[in-house]
Amino acid sequence: MCKGLATLPATCLKSAKDIKHKIGFLLQKPEPQTVSQKQTNKETKREVSAAELEKWKKSFTDLMNSEDGRQVFTNFLRSEFSEENIEFLNACKEFKQLSPAKMAAKAKLIFVKYVETDSPKQVNLDAATREGTRQNLETGSPSASSFDEAQRLIHILLEKDSYRRFLQSRAMQDLSLRSESRSTGTQQRQQKTAGA
């Protein structure tokens, strides 16, 4: 049996994760509406305006700052089997809001779940960042900045990689079509009202 992924070079781990994502992409069914799109429709609490959708298309920050945008993006990541990245960022955000007394226990949970090698939802970090984060937690008591470097790298990964695929995704195309059809319907009603 395998002695664990810790013995493999970081480049092999990255390649394995890339292959996992590609296989996940290939396994998606090209049906008119996939499960993730149905979730997107159900979980977006309100219709997304054309203006808000345009903000999401222009800026990853605007997408992440919107509750609906974050939900749609999370569903997209789930469809790609990479939701651990957004879950890690959410866990770090919650961690920073904790009282210092509760930080140590939460930091250990975050590390074991997302950062540690062979963790259940391991995020894609290089060995130096993983080790630096471990040392941050082991030397002294954890602080709000304990995961900052790991957070920064995962944020960059999401913005430069996943966000670009999200913009081209079926879920985003469907949202755009729904937004355009609502906008067209509103314009037609306005024209009828003005003509009457």
Image: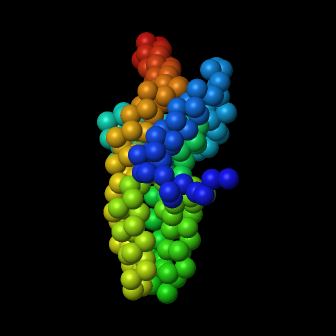
Residue at 58% of width from left, 57% of height from top? Answer: 4
Q: Give the residue furthest to the top.
A: 195
Residue 181 shows in this picture: yes
Q: 19 above or below 74?
A: above
Residue at 39% of width from left, 75% of height from top? Answer: 135
Give the percent coordinates (x, y) of residue 77.
53, 42
Residue 73 shows in this picture: no
In the visual, does 43 lie left or right of 177?
right
Give the percent coordinates (x, y) of residue 71.
53, 46
Q: How is the image coloured?
A: rainbow
Give the percent coordinates (x, y) of residue 143.
39, 79
In the visual, does 59 lie left or right of 184?
left
Frontmost residue, 24 versus 40: 24
Residue at 50% of width from left, 81% of height from top? Answer: 104
Give the percent coordinates (x, y) of residue 110.
52, 67
Residue at 38% of width from left, 75% of height from top? Answer: 136
- Labels in figure, total: 0
